[in-house]
Image (cartoon, rainbow, N blue to C red):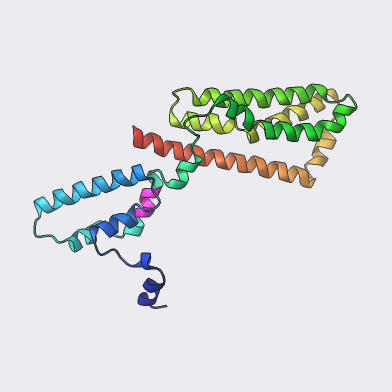
Amino acid sequence: MTGDLRSLLSPRLQPPRTVAEWLEVATDGLTPEAAHRVRHDYLNHLQDTLAAQPDLTHTDILRCWGSAHTTNRELRRTHLTVRDARRLPPRHLSLGGSLWSASAPVAGLTVAALPDLRRGEAVTPFLLSVGILTALALLRWWVLSRPLPPTRRAAAYWLAEPLGGALMAGLVAALWFLHTGTLTPDRLIAWTREPASWVALSFLSFHIWRLSLAVNASRKLGAETA
């Protein structure tokens, strides 16, 4: 595929011809606030350079700045992107909204434990699990009402989300069953070979991955607001 055909199919692959086009490509994907700061810094640098070397053309400036796409990749590593912003905890969360977020895992836990509850079994671990989910919902609301640093805020928020609460409730239930002898280590080891355990581990891995992304995004936010 020739360069002209590639540029025709994807105009963004064409090298920027003006400073405005270069900045548009270099800040693509950044949040509006981050893109504004980057543009401001580059334009100030442009004015200083032209004041010191008035014979330079914009083409010379763009040649000195290098590839806009390479710059964009570098800026995405250090500045908050639109995708990063979606991973940050909300700025405000009402108490009712926080408690409502725990309703789905509580409902799922109730359905799963219903056969045992009808026989009068597993009442204690069920109540403990519901208590943990409720406590985590209250913790999420409390965290968002505190002036915590962005990284701690993101970590606490994601650790206290419903998925984390469901995983913790499952861990408490497993430890309770091991303590009471309802679940033996051999049965637990056998369970790890079942597809259900793979699903649980997948959810755990997904939760940890999302936590790492949220913490990384909060670090970018903290660096920009420092």
Q: Main secondary structure of the magenta part?
A: helix
Q: Which quadrant of the figure contains the C terminus?
A: top left
Question: Is 62 left, or right, of 151 in this rendering?
Answer: left
Point 47% across, 22% down: residue? 146
Spot occupied by residue 141 in the image (x, y as percentages of width and height)? 55, 25
Percent position of residue 91, x then y: 46, 31
Q: Is 139 placed above or below 204 here?
A: above
Whether 86 is drawn above or below 123: the answer is below
Vertical side of 138 occupied by 86: above or below: below
Left or right of 214 in this view: 43? left
- Residue range (magenta): 71-76
Check the picture and name the quadrant holding the N terminus: bottom left
Residue 182 shows in the view? no
The x, y position of residue 98, in whole percent, is: 59, 28
Question: Residue sitting at 88 percent across and 24 percent down?
Answer: 120
- Residue 78 image-quadrant placement: top left
